Image (tube, grey):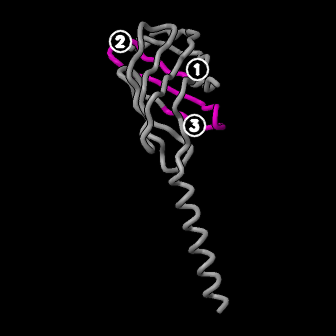
Amino acid sequence: MMRAILAGMLFLGAAGVAAAQDQVPDFTGTWTGEFDVIVMGRDAGSAGKIEKATVTYDLANQEGRAIWGDVSSDKTSGKRPVVLAFSMNNGTLLGSDTEAFHRMTVISPNRMEACFGDNGSGSIFASCGILQRAQ
């Protein structure tokens, strides 16, 4: 009898965890943060430099774990489309735009750490910083 009760509790606990993983937070809105971006040429021996940038993600659309919208910076002209996928671990978003790879980690409902980088045809760059959702 005790084994049956224990097995039932384990089953219900696993079902609860699975249900929690299906609950996806709403990521739509405007997320903005200040970043120190390291930029460097692709040639060996290139000197790196730090540039300050304000980055804004306008995430206008979400269907389940798929999120998309635009990303922009005060250092670049215009907005670029961005797509993100919310991982099954319920803590990480992964995605890209037309220039960079993006990884975001949820800190709270209105704060995320965002990291992005690129090894494109011109210079290479990377940065991490904190995004805050506009209220």
Q: Quadrant of residue 37?
A: top right
Q: Disc 1 and disc 2: Cα gap in Å? A: 26 Å
The amino acid type found where label 3 is placed reads Thr
Q: Give the label, 1 or 2, closer to the camera.
A: 1
From the image, tell me which residue sits under label 2.
122
The amino acid type found where label 2 is placed reads Gly
The amino acid type found where label 1 is placed reads Thr
Q: Quadrant of residue 85?
A: top left
User: In the image, residue 31 lies at what x, y percent?
Assistant: 57, 24
| Number of other residues with Cα within 10 Å of mark 1, as a class: few under 14, some 14 to 19, many 20 or more | many
Image point (43%, 32%), residue name: 61
- In the rendered image, is residue 130 in sight? no
Q: Earlier in the sequence, mark 2 or mark 3?
A: 3
From the image, tell me which residue sits under label 1.
32
Marks 1 and 3: in contact by CB < 8 Å?
no
- Residue 83 is left or right of residue 105, and the answer is left
Magenta residues span: 103-127
Find residue 77 and name its label. Answer: none
Q: Disc 3 and disc 1: Cα gap in Å? A: 14 Å
Find residue 105 and name its label. Answer: 3
